[in-house]
Amino acid sequence: MNEILTIAIILIFYVITSFVGYRLLVKTIDARIQMAIDGVAGAFQDIFGDSKLAK
């Protein structure tokens, strides 16, 4: 019975840490994508200025 409990605790710990790690990874990737999009938007703003495409 102790062995089953030990395995269950290890599995629960693994699932929780995997989920937290996944969430952190997704947030990091989202932040990098957003920075890239902002960079492209800034470049278009520089190219087109105040034209209708930039608004």
Image (cartoon, grey):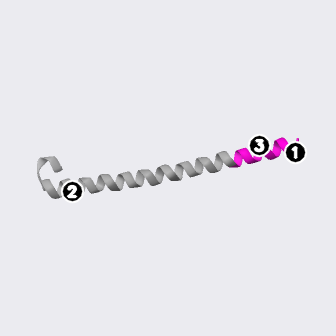
- Residue plotted at (11% across, 51% down): 51
Q: Which mark is residue 8?
A: 3
Residue 38 is left or right of residue 31, and the answer is left
User: What residue sits 34% from the left and 56% below the top?
Assistant: 35
Q: Give how far across and how far down residue 39 sits, in percent.
A: 28, 57
Calculate the distance from the C-alpha at mark 2 to the C-alpha at mark 3.
52 Å
Number of residue marks: 3
Pick the residue in front: 53 or 36.
36
- Asked if marks 1 and 2 touch (Cβ < 8 Å), the reply is no
Query: Residue type at mark 1?
Result: Asn
Question: Helix, strand or loop at disc 3?
Answer: helix
Main SS, magenta residues: helix
Answer above or below: position of 46 versus 26.
below
Q: Are marks 1 and 3 in contact (CB under 8 Å)?
A: no
- How many other residues sit within 10 Å of disc 3, few (<14), some (14-19) or many (≥20)? few
Residue 38 x %, y %: 29, 55
Residue type at mark 3 is: Ala
- Please report whichever mark, 1 or 2, sits nearer to the chain's N-terminal start: 1
> Which secondary structure, mark 2?
helix
Q: Three-letter amino acid code at disc 2?
A: Ala
Q: Residue at x 21, y 56 (%)?
A: 43
The residue tagged 1 is: 2
The disc, 1 or 3, on the residue closer to the chain's N-terminal end is 1
Q: Which mark is residue 43?
A: 2
Q: Residue furthest right?
A: 1
Label drawn at residue 42 = none
What is the quadrant of the N terminus in the image?
top right
Picture quadrant of residue 2: top right
Q: Indicate the secondary structure of the residue bearing disc 1.
A: helix
Read off the magenta span.
1-13
Q: Residue at x 67, y 48 (%)?
A: 14
